[in-house]
Amino acid sequence: MIELQLLVKNGTTEVRVFDNLVFSEKAFWKIDEFRVATGEKLVEGQKVNFEAEDCVDRKGRCHLFVDVYEGRSRNKVEAYLPPSTPAAQAGPNPAGPTGSGGGSGGEPDDINFSPDRG
């Protein structure tokens, strides 16, 4: 498992969000999602050696939601989003993830992040 510390920036606001990339059959999709969000091109069937050091100083976009557990709220990564394209900036993606933030109240659907060494 790789434990990520993401420095999430939205305008002038910065928060630290923790996430895990787990090396199990059911969770490989999330590792691939992270790799694509941070600019890697995936090749079908290619074997990849992916280590924690490979995550340092990457930048990308993610969609956050607020998780409430035992009365405490915290930000969690719902999805890592592919790199922004001019077409994607034209409007919201109706097939994209939903959750708090969802574009209402002036909040963006996607937020920039960079893994932090902190």
Image (tube, rainbow, N blue to C red):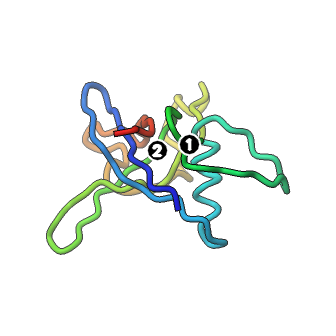
Where 25 sits versus 101, above or below? below
Front residue (pair 47, 64): 47
- Identity of the residue drawn at 48% across and 38% down: 61
Residue type highlighted by circle 2: Cys
Q: Which mark is residue 9?
A: none
Where 108 sits versus 69, above or below? above
Find the distance from the CA under tag 1 to the CA under tag 2: 20 Å
Front residue (pair 23, 51): 51
Query: In the image, residue 10 lies at what x, y percent?
Result: 32, 32
- Identity of the residue drawn at 63% across and 60% down: 29
Tally of marks: 2
Where 13 sits versus 67, above or below? above
Query: In the image, residue 23 lies at what x, y percent?
Result: 60, 65
Q: Residue 62 carries which label?
A: 2
- Identity of the residue drawn at 62% across and 71% down: 24
Closer to the N terminus: mark 1 or mark 2?
1
- Identity of the residue drawn at 25% across and 31% down: 13
Badge 2: residue crowd in 10 Å (few <14, some 14–19, many ≥20): many
Residue on which the image places disc 1: 53
Viewer-side label of 1, 2: 1
Quarter the C terminus occupies? top left
Q: Label 2 near label 1: C-beta < 8 Å?
A: no
Where disc 1 sits, the SS reads helix
Query: In the image, residue 4 lies at what x, y percent?
Result: 44, 50
Residue type highlighted by circle 1: Glu
* Outermost residue to the right: 45
